[in-house]
Image (cartoon, rainbow, N blue to C red):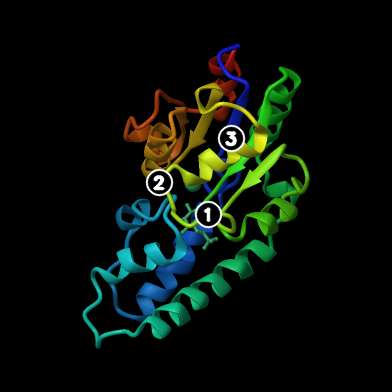
């Protein structure tokens, strides 16, 4: 086999929480009269919460904001986002994702999460994947967000597998860049695939089964 492990991004790869991120940021931006659309939203993929806020504030024209006010805004967005996450259940884990994960595991591959999100443990619990992965590296154990490779390098370390034997799966261009910076091959879906950011650009995660062989 070409790989010993697969490290999955979470939002936009395992489940469609990327849409909840968009809706929560959109609501905050509308309230502050900041232009915000899906094109800007694509730049937030893979990027930490505070760095995402800074991208949104590029078009803000109101009075200067203190660091404290920025933290309050990010918290407000996160509260809105968490309200959507609270509604999630195992039905929000797409069947093609669960079948693909199980097939890859049956092939003998180690499976990990590499996500910038601090909400990762909550989301995995909501969709019924608590304890499923061999390693979980997320926004709670990193200091630099994607495109820095830290989150993927830490996942590989947790698994005890060399980066060159790990395949990263991403929907974010920043995440694909992070995987490459960590010395890993990258398979993309969604926005990153449209941008040709991966070594493989997939229409469905099911393609991972033949890519990993
Ligand atoms: C990433 C998302 O997975 O997590 C980003 O793609 C998000 O859009 C980042 O900003 C941080 O998420 P959270 O849940 O810690 O606010
Ligand atoms: Mg993502």
Residue 102 location (% of width, % of height): 73, 28
Q: Secondary structure at mark 1?
A: loop
Alpha-carbon span between mark 2 and mark 1: 10 Å
Residue 184 location (% of width, % of height): 46, 28
Name the side, left or right, on which 164 lies relative to 52.
right
Alpha-carbon span between mark 1 and mark 3: 13 Å
Dot label at residue 142: 1
Taking depth in this image into account, of 120 and 31 the one nearest to the observer is 120
Q: Earlier in the sequence, mark 1 or mark 3?
A: 1
Q: Secondary structure at mark 3?
A: helix
| Residue located farthest toward the bottom when viewing the structure as drawn | 63
User: Circle 3: is it few (<14), some (14-19), or many (20+) Cα within 10 Å?
Assistant: many
Label 2 with label 1: CB-CB less than 8 Å: yes
Residue 40 location (% of width, % of height): 31, 57
- Vertical position of residue 44 compared to residue 172: above or below: below
**What residue did someone put label 3 on?**
156
Q: The N terminus appears in which quarter of the rendering?
A: top right
Alpha-carbon span between mark 2 and mark 3: 14 Å
Name the side, left or right, on which 40 lies relative to 130.
left
Taking depth in this image into account, of 112 and 144 the one nearest to the observer is 144
Dot label at residue 148: 2
């Amino acid at each position: 086999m070409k790989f010993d492990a697969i490290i999955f991004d979470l939002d936009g790869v395992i489940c469609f929480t990327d849409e909840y991120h968009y809706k929560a940021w959109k609501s905050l931006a509308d309230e502050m009269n900041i232009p915000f659309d899906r094109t800007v939203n694509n730049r937030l993929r893979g990027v930490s919460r505070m760095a995402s806020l800074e991208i949104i504030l590029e078009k803000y024209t109101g009075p200067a904001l203190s660091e404290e006010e920025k933290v309050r805004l990010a918290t407000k967005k996160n509260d809105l986002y968490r309200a959507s996450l609270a509604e999630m259940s195992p039905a929000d884990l797409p069947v093609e994702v669960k079948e693909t994960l199980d097939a890859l595991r049956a092939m003998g591959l180690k499976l990990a999460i590499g996500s910038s999100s601090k909400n990762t443990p909550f989301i995995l619990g909501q969709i019924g994947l608590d304890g499923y992965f061999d390693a979980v590296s997320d926004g709670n154990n990193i200091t630099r967000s994607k495109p820095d490779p830290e989150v993927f390098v830490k996942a590989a370390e947790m698994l005890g597998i060399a980066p060159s034997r790990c395949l990263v799966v991403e929907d974010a261009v920043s995440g694909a860049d992070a995987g490459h910076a960590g010395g890993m091959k990258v398979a993309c879906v969604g926005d990153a695939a449209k941008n040709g950011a991966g070594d493989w650009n997939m229409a469905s995660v099911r393609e991972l089964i033949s890519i990993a062989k």
